Amino acid sequence: MTGTLLSIKGLTKAYPGVVANDTVSLDIGTGEIHALLGENGAGKSTLVKMIYGLVKPDGGTMQMRGAPFAPPEPRSARAAGVAMVFQHFSLFDALDVSENIALGMENPPPLRDLAARIRTVSEDYGLPLDPYRTVGGLSAGERQRVEIIRCLLQDPKLLIMDEPTSVLTPQEVGILFETLNKLRSEGTSILYISHKLEEIRTLCDTATILRLGKNVGTCDPRETTARQMAEMMVGSELQTPKGTGATPGAAVLDVSGLSLPAPTRFGTALKNVHLRLHMGEVLGIGGVAGNGQDELLAALSGEMRAAPDAIRLKGQDIGHLGPTARRRRGLLAAPEERLGHAAAPDMSLTENALLTGAVREGLTANGFLKWGKARSFAERIIETFDVRTPGPDNAARSLSGGNLQKFVIGREVLQRPEVLVVNQPTWGVDASAAAAIRQALLDLAGNGTAVLVISQDLDELMEVADHFAALNEGRLTDTRRTGDLTIEEIGLMMGGAHDGMGIAHAEA
């Protein structure tokens, strides 16, 4: 396939105080997989929203197959052949696959006919789906299949994918890439957004790099290293996180036989979880989304209570304690959902700093809040972790996702925890910010903090963790040294291979 499918010329979009896209131009070829790269806040999301009709540009033009293209809404974009798989799925747990897909169609056929089409299309593209399964019971990878099949039923000419592999096992990534290559061979163009640069090098034909809203260059990913692309994104040399090489000390956190029921109908029960975490150690826990990661963090943070002696901190039972009491003893946590769970959207950064820092930073006295001290704490977080914001009085929701993530992680790191549990610490964060967050976690461990990192990013876990275990359906595998593992073994562990896959952590 040759020729240009979508041509973008001088596209500009400004918001109060920031130019999100500054005269951006690029061409996407027919049957091309085109990567869109950039730091958080570089303008990627704004650009694809304009292509998909969610945002109206202030200036510039687009052409689809040589004809003017200016969709006023997503319906118009879909009619022109543009489909989009968002990073955050928009599915109803209580409905089945076919019902969910029908909701995303302009004129859905009868459900029986639609179910037959879903089976045919999903099998043709190597993404088999049962149209009658309830979505609440699907894995994250299967949920993504629902979104992809919903798009493929539209027969798209351009498929936009935003961080599509963040919820997949290595084996599922391979299946997805086979599907995308098949679409490319059939002439479908794909605009692919990802922070995983090695995946870009494997999959994509061309990469466009945005920085501060501008197109700063294109490259052939197959002839460009991941480091070179990352440095194009940030405009400077990328610093690689470095561990201290220190030997872990005494055990500080013991989890033994932790079992908890699912907190919601579509949650995951924890089943006989065992782990031991030492001072100065980084333990990485991998797994496909929805296998108990949120529940494990809630159990360790104190949001969910545990049976007696299931969780012990420095030899003391803490399973009955709530989050504030655990923080007072030195166990801190940062959940995956940053807006609404880790941070209150409409509260200022100062108020959000106060929410978790009150005890350890001494931000209250005799029932009164020390606002000056809380503001100083927020300013210290902003400065230390390079949080891009006008100041501590700004609301949490005003920050980009990556900058809010830096604030949330920085808030916990600066409280000098004895144990820190983090879920998806660099989710949606660009290469430079991710490196800074990982270095902060390694520095904590180097100073004696026990760090437990729950992440779906295997490259991240291999980079920072001394030991690795995987969650599958609420069960935790035995723990193994990261240096002893292959990607294939990790994939098997994430897929539920519990027996014979590792040695007990106490022996490691």
Image (tube, grey):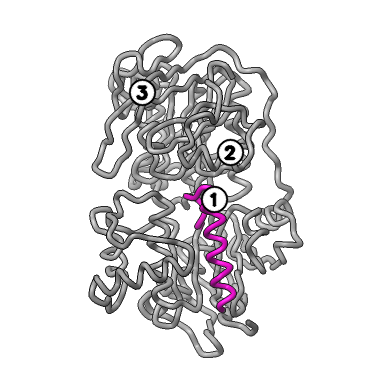
> Which label number is shown at residue 259?
none
Q: Where is residue 330 in the image (x, y as percent from the top left)?
A: 44, 19
- Outermost residue, top side: 315
Residue highlighted by disc 2:
489
Say whether residue 429 is left or right of residue 224.
left
Residue kind at label 2, given as amino acid type: Glu
> Which label number is shown at residue 258?
3
Q: Residues within 10 Å of mark 3 (few under 14, many from 20)?
A: many
Say whether residue 337 is left or right of residue 225.
left
Q: Residue at point 37% right, 67% down?
A: 119
Residue kind at label 1, given as amino acid type: Gln
Q: In this view, does 472 lie above or below 37?
A: above
Mark positioned earlier in the residue sequence (2 or 3): 3
Q: Quadrant of residue 369?
A: top left
Residue kind at label 3, given as amino acid type: Leu
Residue 173 in the magenta stretch? The answer is: yes
CA distance separating discs 1 and 3: 29 Å
Residue highlighted by disc 1:
171
Magenta span covers which residues?
A: 163-186
Q: Residue at point 52% right, 84% down?
A: 64
Label 1: which secondary element: helix
Q: Nearer the viewer, residue 351 or 206?
A: 206
